[in-house]
Amino acid sequence: MAVVPLTDASRRPTNFPVVTLSIIVLNFIVFIVELIYGQPFVDRWSMVPANISSGQHLETLLTAMFMHGSWSHIIGNMVFFWAFGPEIEDAMGWWRYLIFYLLGGIIAGLTQVAFDPHSTIPNLGASGAIAAVMGAFLVTYPRDQIRSLLVIFVFVRVAYITSALLIGVWFLLQLISIGTVAGTQQTGGVAYLAHVGGFIFGAVMARLFEAPGQASSAGADLSDS
């Protein structure tokens, strides 16, 4: 079974989500560049924990969050980002939101480095920054209904799931996944520690990045319209 979040069914942003959309477009542009220039480009601009621990290629903490390993990787990330990003952008205002997103991605990368500083496995993807947005959404709009696709084998239906439940289960799965790979030799895959680090940053810092008076009034509750 899989759950794919689509949109917040409880509110609409009052402002066009220009930062969220711009980041999505930028991610796809960078991915196309990856396809054109191949592995050398990926090796240069993805984040390698061992390099960061030794003070080298620190810029990759930023560049890696705009890179992806496959079409399924980037599409999955951008679908999740579009489901939660616009409302948080509305609550924070565009410039606070942009700083929050970038910091979330950097903190996520540093979390991965802190727990595996000698790893030479390249890390790339927007998942850590998106996890920060999801953490902020959980704190800001825990009761919102998220319109989602519920996929069970070949059966697909639309379901409405409370954000606290959907995001809470997602976070729990990240913690379980960390426990599953702990003590094994990791040769690649999902950077669950980065997800957890980004999520905790987002949940803790969300209120500090809110624009004054925005979160309580951002968007129009669809049940009232």
Image (tube, grey):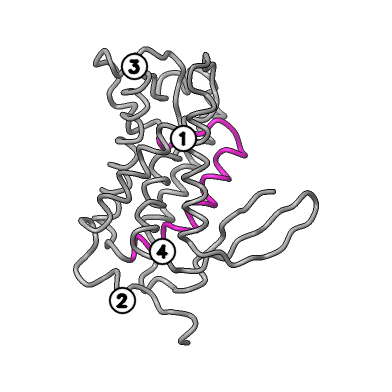
Q: Is residue 140 left or right of residue 211?
A: right
State the CA–CA distance, disc 1 to disc 2: 32 Å
| Residue under the image location 41 percent in, 52 percent down | 134
Secondary structure under badge 2?
Answer: loop
Going from N to C along the chain, the mark reached first, 3 or 1, is 3
Q: Is residue 132 left or right of residue 192?
A: left
Residues in magenta? 65-90
Residue 70 within the segment the image draws in magenta: yes
User: Within 10 Å of the Cα at label 2, are there few (<14), some (14-19), or many (20+) other Cα atoms?
Assistant: few
Mark number displayed over residue 217: 2
> Do the CB atoms of the residues marked 3 and 1 lie less than 8 Å apart?
no
1 vs 2, front mark: 2
User: Residue 165 appears at what percent x and percent y?
Assistant: 50, 58
State the CA–CA distance, disc 1 to disc 4: 26 Å
Going from N to C along the chain, the mark reached first, 2 or 4, is 4
200 up-or-down from 211: above or below: above
- What residue did someone put label 1 on? 125
User: Residue 114 appears at what percent x and percent y?
Assistant: 31, 23
Going from N to C along the chain, the mark reached first, 3 or 2, is 3
State the CA–CA distance, disc 2 to disc 4: 15 Å
Amino acid beneath label 2: Ser
